[in-house]
Amino acid sequence: MPLPPLLIRPMTADDLDSVLLLEEASFSDPWSRGLYEHELNDNRLSRYQVVVPAGTPSGLPDVIAQGGWMLFGEEAHILTIAVRPDFRGQGIGRWLLLHLLAEARGEGCDSVVLEVRPSNEAALRLYEKLGFVMISRRKRYYPDKEDALVLMLEELDDAHLWGPLAGELEELARQMTGGEIVNGE
């Protein structure tokens, strides 16, 4: 089944019911409503986006993917990224991650850090293909005591690195939006 035209737009409080369903479907230790409310309302350094079918008003249960990051000086920390299970494997997570990287780059970040479970092989492959490298391991990081791999993408401000990624972002945006670049902001 072909994807409907999609867009990436800022997450709002009206999206939280749908985002929390996505959290439950994606993570063994999902974030709470209170944590998301804090991030959206009180944390001026965090940025959260959702992927929805184009034309979907906020608040409908149509969030297909979500992701967020926090600004730490010249470093971005990817805090969360998830795609609904029935939409995985279609490039949506890659598109959203590239969008988050472009946002971070636009705010002056030259490196990006994230944590990922070693058991999340699909995510690890995606991050490695985009140039992330493991810089450390956090033992027993998650509530179920699984370690976290800490990955970093450096030199995001380097044109040789960003040029191909920007081209891929533009192509994915064309594919996901049905041929036209849609800015949901």
Image (tube, rainbow, N blue to C red):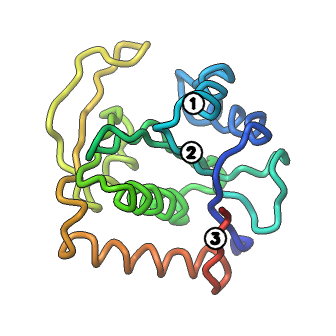
**Residue type at tag 2:** Tyr
**Callout 1 secondary element:** helix
Position of 60 with respect to 27 (left or right) is right
Q: On the rendered image, what quadrant is the N terminus found in?
A: bottom right
Residue at image x 29%, y 27%? 148
Dot 2: element = strand
* Nearer to me, 42 or 9: 42
Q: Residue at x 75, y 40 (%)?
A: 18
Q: Quadrant of the C terminus?
A: bottom right
138 relative to 165, above or below: above
Provide the residue designation for mark 3. Answer: 183
Relative side of 176 to 58, left or right:
left
Report x, y in % for residue 154.
18, 53
| First reached walking from the N terminus: tag 3 or tag 2 | 2
Q: CA distance from mark 3 to mark 2?
A: 15 Å
Q: Are marks 2 and 1 in contact (CB under 8 Å)?
A: yes
Q: Residue at x 60, y 22 (%)?
A: 35
